[in-house]
Image (cartoon, rainbow, N blue to C red):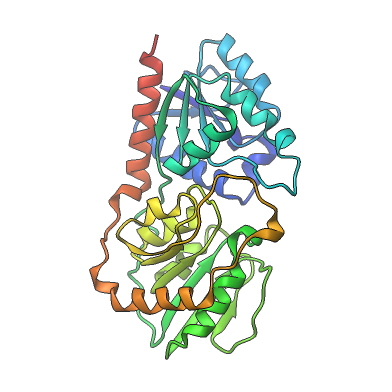
Amino acid sequence: MKVCINNLEGKLGNLNIGPTIFTKRLAKNLENLGVKVVGRKKKHDILLVVGDDSNTPAKIDNSRKKGAKIVQRLDGIYHTLDDDSMKLNEPIQKNFNKTDAVIYQSEFSKRLVENYFGENSSLNFIINNGVDSNKFNNKEWKRDKKIFLASAKWRPTKRLNSILEGFDYARIKDSELWVLGKHDSFLERDNIKYFEEISSKDLFKFYRLSDFFIHLGVNDPCPNAVVEALVSGLPVICSSSGGTKELVKNSGEVIKENESLKPFYLSDIEKIEKEKVAGAIHKVIENKEKYEFPREDLYIENCAKKYLRAFEETLDKK
């Protein structure tokens, strides 16, 4: 089988963003399964469409003319009122209407997309992201402090302010919070360390030295950072908003809050009360040995096998 992945080419292939990081991992593991990952100029059986590349509708037509089936991988879609979401979603929806199959990253992702685009009559699959279990692990413990890690492309939807305030309020003895990524909020404390942006090649080093992970994003479909934490054996604190809780399952603490598929203004994003965050922090320490690990369901090799089965089913469809 020959597969072309659209976001591995050109400018998209050089970006240090979640979708590109994931598809590079996926491509490597598909090749381990005997799949040949090729450029779009070469004949391919499957075109995997990732992201909102405005050139992709034309690529889809070219691939289909050459006999390829089209599979679209969908994370989320634009649904904040600060942006012209209809315009931003237009290329995604054009692709959506041309696909032979859709791979959603979570049940939430599927509900969100169908709420705006309607149901797609094509095949559809739900496959969580995955990471390398040999790279992301916790074999380099231990420090004399409890390390809480938070990592993201920080923007209002990630609610770094709630993480900082909740951690500070928890007053955990001999603990530190490490924040990875260029931050949009700041709280000056001796036990909060800011590391700015970290290369994807070096991320695993921080997971190996950490004990817990905090991610309070709003309507995140399937954040790579949480997958990395869980495969590393870190119990995760998250909110009930979005698809993150589908990843965490029995491997951490979920803070309940109102959940909605309705569009919102970034300025209207509600903080999670510091008391709730602090409570979850105390609970995750108390229950550390009770959580379910290892998380083999999130290993990239198992993720790739699910993608391969989806591709095979798509090719078999008449």
Is residue 306 visible from the viewing direction of this image? yes
Give residue 56's quadrant in the image: top right
Above or below, 158 against 80 in this view is: below
In the image, residue 89 lies at what x, y percent?
67, 34
Observer-nearest of 234 and 200? 234
Give residue 228's quadrant in the image: bottom left
What is the quadrant of the C terminus in the image?
Answer: top left
> In the displayed structure, does residue 277 sit left or right of residue 14?
left
At a point 56% along the width and 49% down the height, the residue shown is 18
In the image, residue 31 lies at what x, y percent?
40, 34
At a point 52% along the width and 68% down the height, the residue shown is 150
Observer-nearest of 251 and 254? 254
> In the displayed structure, does residue 42 sit left or right of residue 145?
right
Is residue 141 visible from the viewing direction of this image? no
At a point 57% along the width and 78% down the height, the residue shown is 165
| Numbered disc total | 0
In the image, residue 39 lies at what x, y percent?
57, 27
